[in-house]
Image (spheres, helix red, strand yellow):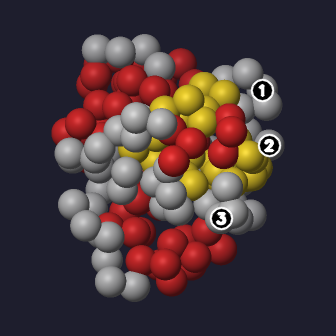
Amino acid sequence: MKRLKNWETLYHNFLTERAHAPFAWGTNDCSSFAVDGIKAITGVDIALDFRTSKYSTKEEAFALITSVTGGSTVADAAAWCAKKHELMEWEHPLCAQRGDLVVFVAPTGDLVSGLVHLNGQIVAMGEDGLYILSITKVKRAFHV
């Protein structure tokens, strides 16, 4: 999987479009935000297996993770999608670069997925809106 030629502009446009969109399970939660960003960058939807089932609650989202991956966390879902699409996991997650998929602990204590933004920051959708946090929060990262 490769980034599109004009991925920087496409990524910027994606972030601008989603900056004020409200959180919604199944359409604009942490996982859908991250994979939609990857789709903007690459043109590839790495979460097709998750989009075949609709979910509208946290419980339904985690049940879907279990049914698709056999795992139980957002990190399991991210790793499953990354492996299926041959995205290399960074040995040192803090080396992740702009547009890469990351998993981190949000201020709420939840494990969530997001993307590397700019200047050592990560961006993700949270129930209270966009998180923009230090990359030092990253637990796992996958090169897009």
Q: CA distance from mark 3 to mark 1?
A: 22 Å
Image location (x, y in percent) of residue 111: 60, 26
Quadrant, the C terminus: bottom left
Q: Amino acid at mark 1?
A: Thr
Q: CA distance from mark 2 to mark 1?
A: 10 Å
Q: Secondary structure at mark 1?
A: loop
Image location (x, y in percent) of residue 108: 78, 26
Q: Does residue 110 lie above or below 2 as drawn? A: above
Q: Residue at x 54, y 52 (%)?
A: 115
Image location (x, y in percent) of residue 23: 67, 47
**Marker disc for residue 128:** 2
Q: Secondary structure at mark 3?
A: loop
**Dot 3 or dot 2, earlier in sequence:** 3
Q: Residue at x 50, y 50 (%)?
A: 96
Identify the residue under disc 3. 118
Identify the residue under disc 1. 108
